[in-house]
Amino acid sequence: MTQASRIRARQRLGKYRIETRLAQGGFADVFRAYDTIEGIRVALKVPQPELLSPSLLEDFKKEVRLTARLDHPHILKIKNASYLGEHFVIVYHLGDGALSDRLTRRISFETAFDFGEQILDALAHAHAHRLVHCDVKPDNLIVFQGKHLRLTDFGLAKVSMRTVHASGSGTLGYMAPEQAMGRPSLRSDVFSAGLILYRMFAGVLHEWPFEWPPPGAARARLKLHPDLFDLLRRSLEIDPRKRFRDAGQMYDALVGMRARALRFARAKSRARVTKSSRTDWRAARLRQFKRNYQSALEARLACRKCDGPVSATMVACPWCSAPRKILREDTPYPARCPRCRRGSKLDWCYCPWCYGASIGPLSDREYGDKRYVERCANKKCSRRQLMPFMRYCPWCRTKVKKPTVVAGVKETCPKCHWMVLGDYWKSCPWCAHSLVHGAKRR
């Protein structure tokens, strides 16, 4: 088979018209496309042409056969798989987005619990067929209609009864320790699912070396029912023999505690409301901040220490001064800076948030973005496109000297001269300088 050419927007593949690229993985790209016959939008998974080989093609065919065996409401079914011209294409129903995107916003306890049940229900069905997914992560959980999850991407799955030693396949950050050493099992999927559940309930991702207690454990212990906290701890045991034997056993345990876990969470919520009623001025101030500035600052994350709204670009929490030099939360970008863990686009050469080493480019394609609203001061820069609150140009590494301006804000930090909100913040989120004695007016 000859090497296929790269797919571009507005290209036709059979009855499908390509609209945009949704994701780029290690072996395949996912596109949103319009079905010109059925009149619906779908997701197309296409192997990357430069990597296409007989063995890779056989892996994708195996994924089709494995997924076809699994008939479950929380597993994403394949609509079609065939050759369209010179491309092998797998067609899926198109969802609203991945769980990784949903986790960048606040999530209620009830929704998190529902999502946890759906994840384990899907894995339990796969495990009942002796199938190990090997790549359970938020990117492989697609959200439909805002609250219905479907597990996808069985490309790395192993039939556990006939498993050969794998090569550490999976995704770093959500991979069980034994899987990283080439010994995946049903308990490896339990560990990956436990990481996702912990991320949803505790608000932070438990990271390597997976020592207990993980970040946020003290706060999670206070707000979660003890049985639910113990379930999370058991699923994240380093020794696979101490975990649930499979997702089915973990699912039964989670469903069995649903009523008491929800009652406990609601009681905690009522207690917080009663306590917050005594400090209504703080709540009013927070609501005013969110209404006026949350969107402009992209402050959609929550500080792990005080729960105040923060953005990925902040190096300190402006509400409690907690350091944020390394990003602990998920990022919607397709890559991360290895130094500060903040998001990176595939065509950036340098991290725009810290002065780390070169990170790319990871792709020879230029990607546009509606957030490019500012210009690099270096006239010799190849792109000169900047997003708000970037510290360095991602193309030439030139330091940004002109601070981002937010409409209506006239205060600046006395140290770094970037905009601050002295009426709300305790410290500058860009340099961590204390604002207790006030900020300067422009």
Image (cartoon, helix red, strand yellow):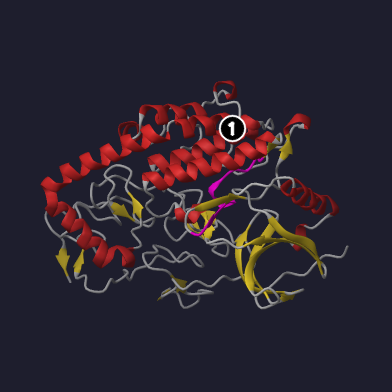
Q: Position of residue 31 (x, y in %)?
A: 64, 66
**Relative to residue 377, is residue 168 drawn left or right?**
right
Relative to 20, residue 67 above or below = above
**Label 1 CA crowd tier, 10 Å (few <14, some 14–19, many 20+):** many
- Residue occupying the point 74% across, 61% down: 80
**Relative to residue 188, is residue 158 drawn left or right?**
right
Count of numbered marks: 1
Relative to 100, residue 10 above or below = below
Quadrant where the N terminus lies?
bottom right
**Relative to residue 162, is residue 433 drawn left or right?**
left
Whether residue 174 can be seen here: no
Residue 140 among those drawn in magenta: yes
- Residue occupying the point 50% across, 38% down: 195
Q: Quadrant of residue 413?
A: bottom left
Whether residue 243 can be seen here: yes
What residue is shown with label 1? Answer: 248
Q: Quadrant of residue 250?
A: top right
Relative to 208, residue 344 above or below = below
- Residue occupying the point 64% across, 33% down: 179
Residue 9 among those drawn in magenta: no
Q: Secondary structure at mark 1?
A: helix
Which residue occupies the extreme right position in the image?
Answer: 1
**Relative to residue 439, is residue 88 drawn left or right?**
right
312 and 23: which one is in front?
23
Q: Position of residue 231 (x, y in %)?
A: 46, 29
385 and 369: which one is in front?
369
The span shown in magenta is 133-145
Q: Position of residue 169 (x, y in %)?
A: 68, 41
Quadrant where the C terminus lies?
bottom left
184 and 405: which one is in front?
184
The amino acid at mark 1 is Gly
Q: Position of residue 32 (x, y in %)?
A: 62, 68
